[in-house]
Amino acid sequence: MSDLLTNPSNTYDASSIQVLEDMEHVRLRPGMYIGGKDDRALHHMVAEIIDNSMDEAVAGHATWIEVELHENGHVSVRDNGRGIPVGPHPKDPSKTAVEIIFCTLNAGGKFSGDSYETSGGLHGVGSSVVNALSDHLRVEVAQNKELFAMEFSRGIPQGKLEKIGAAPNRRGTTVTFHPDPEIFGSLKLKPARLFKMARSKAYLFSGVEIRWKTAIPDGETPTEATFHFPGGLADYLAETMTGATTYAERPFTGSVSFERFKAPGKVEWAINWTPSRDGFIQSYCNTVPTPEGGTHEAGFWAAILKGIRAYGELTNNKKANQITREDLTSGGCALVSCFIREPEFVGQTKDRLATTEAARLVESSVRDHFDNWLAADTKSAGAILDFLVLRAEERLRRRQEKETQRKTATKKLRLPGKLVDCSATNRDGTEIFLVEGDSAGGSAKMGRDRKTQALLPLRGKILNVLGAASSKLGQNQEINDLCQALGVGMGTKFNVDDLRYDKVIIMTDADVDGAHIAALLMTFFFSQMRPLIDHGHLYLACPPLYRLTQGGKRLYVTDDAEKDIWMEKGLGGKGKIDVQRFKGLGEMDAKDLKDTTMDPNTRKLIRVTIDEDEPGETGDLVERLMGKKPELRFQYIQENARFVEELDV
């Protein structure tokens, strides 16, 4: 409990306001910079350093990159690029450019576009964040036949940049670091994951050779390897689809610069269709993965959709205009990589590209080439068109069946009494909010879109399905109500096509109890309805914890860190900032709840996913935390308790 609550005599004045230095803030709130303290965030640090070397390669200054995992858990990334500038910085001559880059947020050579036409990384945040979250980091720069080195610990320089000798046959930058156990606990860098990361980077830029080394054998990852793929994404797709039957004898691949649009950068792609597996798309911007897609993906699919419809019209196939993007992706296996100047991403970890211009550049570049490819290979084009028409007809048939089911749902299903259903007659675009408590359900009911948004209030915490006997599942009323509302069964009886809503959204209070309820629900879906997660139907709502008001300005924030930032710099209104903390969703009126948590135009949703690289580890962690063996939970708490941030209650 905070001192302010335990000691009412404490005062709140100017001395209560903390001003954190860059490195202190990163260590206090790593989630704001790399997404958290989990396994993904740990490996994201390595990606940030590799991205800096990739920028040198893409700019034409480096031909190879080496990634090495050492026996002591350190990782090194080397390149033969130009090397980080070692001279004093013009704005602060007491510090070298190396120290500025590794100790100052928003410092780097990627802002003006003069040093890099296109670049990845966190744009001046990556190197300094990695430094702040490492208990040891050493950078070596070989430049002008001389070798320089500087060391850091938890973001603090351990001395000045020193010239340590001659380097007549060496150039470039080497960064060696060790993730701080104070931040990441017992998590370790995994050879298999780093190996896959290094290989994928080589596919994304055909002009670079990536060398891999590891001193930590895992039984499946080679200790040394060299990657160089002249075919780029075409090679990547060929490896990914090895052994699969495809509708096109040769995939549609290509690479085009944006020169004719008077814009820097280019787009590269590879796609084929197959009946042998589910479709996928992996997209990248400036060699950075964008797992949530974005404008470059939208432009790519727009070009493919318009092209296949135009080809259908050309061949008098009147059903071609029924094809949608959903049909294209059902069996389409695609890779898209674009390079653009000053990309804009959603979120600091760059999971989704938001640059509007990217959609136009990619669509215009890909469309002409796709039209020509279809015309040149009519056999493959006809097979793909027939397949997509069949997918469209199947989709329309399923929609018709779903509309019929919805129209008679109240007759065919015993829907739970507390369910507030939506009026839409088909699943597309519909949502069901699993709401914590009746009071929150009241506000949500008034703030919802009646056409597409349904509500199911839950009574407290549902049964922990991993910690309970299987016989109890069928007897639990909350679980029965949930299954009936969704229109599906559990376990082997679950069929994702029977799902009555497009999005299932868990909406709980922004507190510990709410997080516990969300964890129980995610455990239920993971163990009993796994395909619902795999097909992207499960989401978490992000209700605010505070409402800040200053004059006529109003802002909602999700945590204390964000609140502290805005309290320090102000909202732009007049007078002091009024702070209201929402103790629960029930305290929010319908307008607050709609604007912050329910309206698709203004809310933030988190899609629940399973790590594709380590699916087994996800299951092991769920079993460890939620299973029947309390000793495993106790062990996990002992191992990780010291990494939990202190909470004010």
Image (cartoon, rainbow, N blue to C red):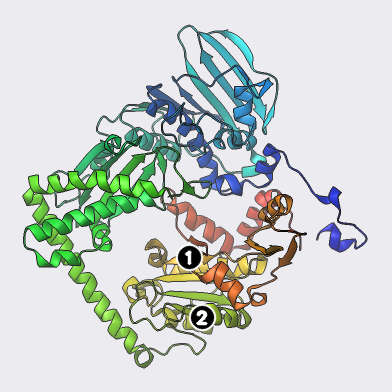
Regarding residue 188, the answer to whether it shows in the image is yes
Where residue 445 sits in the image (x, y, percent)?
Answer: 54, 82
Q: Residue at x 34, y 90 (%)?
A: 412
List the residue tagged with mark 2: 456
Kind of residue sitting beneath label 1: Asn
Find the residue positioned furthest to the right.
9
Label 1 element class: loop
Whole-angstrom CA distance, mark 1 to mark 2, is 22 Å
Q: Taking 281 as reference, is 442 left or right?
A: right
Regarding residue 520, the answer to whether it shows in the image is no
Q: Nearer the viewer, residue 10 or 415?
A: 10
List the residue tagged with mark 1: 601
> Which image quadrant: the C terminus?
bottom right
Where residue 14 sits in the image (x, y, percent)?
Answer: 85, 50
Q: Taking 475 as reference, is 559 left or right?
A: right
Q: Nearer the viewer, residue 234 or 520?
A: 234
Find the residue positioned furthest to the bottom.
411
Give the image quarter of residue 9. Answer: bottom right
Kind of residue sitting beneath label 2: Leu
> Which image quadrant: the N terminus?
bottom right
